[in-house]
Image (cartoon, rainbow, N blue to C red):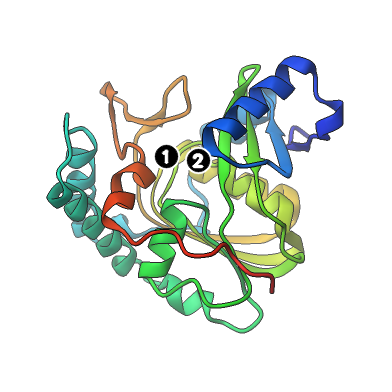
Amino acid sequence: MNTARLLDRPGLLPETRRTVEDFEKEHDTYFSHLVHFDPRALESLHAPGPLPPNIRVASDALPAVIERMATVTEVANLPAQSDADRGRYLRALLDIYGMLPVQAGDSATVPGTTVIAPEREGRILAERLGALPEGGNWTPHAKRIPLDGGLLVGVDEWVPSRADRLVIVDGVVASGVTLMAMMRLTVLPGAAVEIFTCHSTRQGALALARYAEQLGVSLTLHVGHVSGELNGKFYAVAPDAPGQLLLGDVGDTISPVSAASPPRGTAP
């Protein structure tokens, strides 16, 4: 079975170690965990197929979700973004979360739930949604690092106790590797996992469902809209216009119109 591997830092090849250290310097952090998805694993996880019923797509019933996505794509592709543009972008994302049949804030506050909201967009959006309760939350930096045709996910900060109920809030899913890494590091076998996101590629949604099955956990993906495809750099683009990003960098877009980052997540 092709799956992710946890890499031991002392055992990294010199070139890989330099690549990891360069990313750490760029983001002023230290990756305490490294989860590697090699090309064969990604090919298997991203293989074409129908979406299973545990992937619940709000736009299937609500065309207004697609209208909000059009706003997001428009702002993402502007040559320059004003604060007003960024505000429209953030409002559209929050509107999409509000159209999901299940609300992230409700799931996050169920007793015994561990919440993960990766920096920056996950944390910002989870705060706005009331889905980041005090205690029992984790707001790590999780960075994708291209490596030998696959992707290495560097995750900083401590890891919470293994969870049997997990809620993840993030802005978008492209390849799905960062959220798969979150599951790999935190869930117990048999855990119930809910992921809330505005948009996903079909490849990313399928990868999350398949990886959850590999881990032996029960996953429900609540997603506003599924569209686009992955390009060679694993970004979500329009199939008929591969130069057009569907969402751009969500964190870069919304952070200038959002509050500064609070202290990092606290242990449960």
Question: Which residue does the image show at 13% across and 51% down from the upper left?
Answer: 84
The residue that label 2 is drawn on is 204
Question: Which residue does the image show at 76% across and 66% down from the upper left?
Answer: 161
Q: Nearer the viewer, residue 127 or 162?
A: 127
Residue 83 appears anywhere in the view: yes
| Residue 176 drawn at (x, y percent) | 54, 42
**The residue under label 2 is which amino acid type?**
Gly
| Residue 36 drawn at (x, y percent) | 70, 33
| Residue 52 drawn at (x, y percent) | 52, 51
Looking at this rendering, what residue extends furthest in the right direction?
11
Say the numbered circle drawn on residue 57: none
Q: CA distance from mark 2 to mark 1?
A: 5 Å
In terms of image quadrants, where is residue 56? bottom left
Q: Nearer the viewer, residue 150 or 262?
A: 262
Q: Nearer the viewer, residue 87 or 260?
A: 260
| SS at circle 2 | helix
State the quadrant of the C terminus.
Answer: bottom right
Residue 47 appears anywhere in the view: no
Whether 207 is drawn above or below 239: the answer is: below
In this picture, residue 93 sits left or right of residue 120: left
**The residue under label 1 is which amino acid type?**
Thr
Say the numbered circle drawn on residue 201: 1
Looking at this rendering, what residue extends furthest in the bottom direction?
111
In this picture, residue 240 sits left or right of residue 172: left
In terms of image quadrants, where is residue 113? bottom right
Mark 2–mark 1 CB contact (< 8 Å)? yes
Q: How many marks?
A: 2
Question: Which residue does the image show at 50% across and 40% down from the upper left?
Answer: 204
